[in-house]
Image: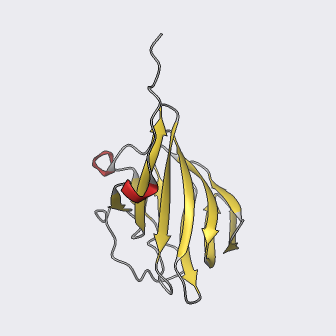
């Protein structure tokens, strides 16, 4: 039986990347079943609305405030994002988020299974309720 070796990472040394929705990402650690990352959207910015092809996520707001739109079939809602709020983005849900106020919105996100990389076409652009203000970082369908 093979096991994933344990690892340790100081957040200050975490690699940075651009998320397909336009937010900035600190890639933290992962194991076979999932990965962890910190997402940040600058004050006043609006992400690109997307859906994921194979992953689902759990988000926990670390700081800042904002709003998250989610649509799953006929169910659609906008929820307030503030420190301490935890929410899910199930497989196939459409979502978009925005940072409100004068500080960035910072979220800890767990992705299951681990993010496969953009070469796999994981994030698909969808139409959300708000006009994105950050550059889209994935090909238009």
Give the residue at x 44% y 46%.
Answer: 9
**8 vs 92: above or below:** above
Q: How many labels does the image show?
A: 0
Q: Tell me the colour scheme of the image.
A: secondary structure
Question: Could one spot residue 59 in this view of the protein?
Answer: yes
* In front of the other: 97 or 17: 17
Q: In this view, does 130 lie to the left or right of 59?
A: left
Residue 75: percent from left, percent from top? 70, 62
Q: Where's residue 59, x and y in %?
A: 61, 58
Question: Can residue 49 be seen from the camera position used here?
Answer: no
The structure residue drawn at horizontal position 52% and vertical position 33%, both measured from the top left corner, is 33
Picture layout, residue 97 above or below residue 130: above
Say which quarter of the image contains residue 80: bottom right
Residue at (55, 55) in percent of width and height: 109
The image shows residue 30 at horizontal and vertical percentages of: 47, 40
Q: Where is residue 44 in the image (x, y as percent from the top left)?
A: 50, 87
Q: Which of 88 and 49 is in front in this view?
A: 88
The answer to whether 92 is drawn above or below residue 139 in the figure is: above
Q: Viewed as shown, does residue 14 lie left or right of 73?
A: left
Given residues 35 and 67, the one toward you in this image is: 35
Against 67, residue 37 (above or below) is above
- The C terminus is located in which quarter? bottom left
């Amino acid at each position: 039986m093979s096991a994933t070796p344990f690892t340790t990472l100081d957040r200050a040394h975490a690699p940075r990347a651009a998320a397909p929705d336009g937010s900035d990402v600190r890639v933290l650690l992962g194991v076979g079943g999932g990965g962890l990352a910190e997402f940040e959207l600058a004050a006043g910015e609006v992400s690109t609305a997307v859906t994921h092809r194979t992953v689902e996520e759990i988000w926990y707001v670390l700081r800042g405030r904002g709003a998250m739109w989610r649509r799953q079939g006929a169910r659609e809602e906008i929820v307030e994002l503030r420190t301490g709020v935890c929410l899910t983005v199930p497989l196939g849900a459409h979502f978009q988020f925005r940072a409100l106020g004068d500080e960035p919105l910072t979220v800890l996100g767990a992705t299951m299974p681990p993010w496969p990389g953009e070469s796999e076409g994981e994030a698909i652009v969808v139409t959300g309720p708000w006009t994105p203000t950050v550059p889209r970082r994935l090909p238009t369908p």
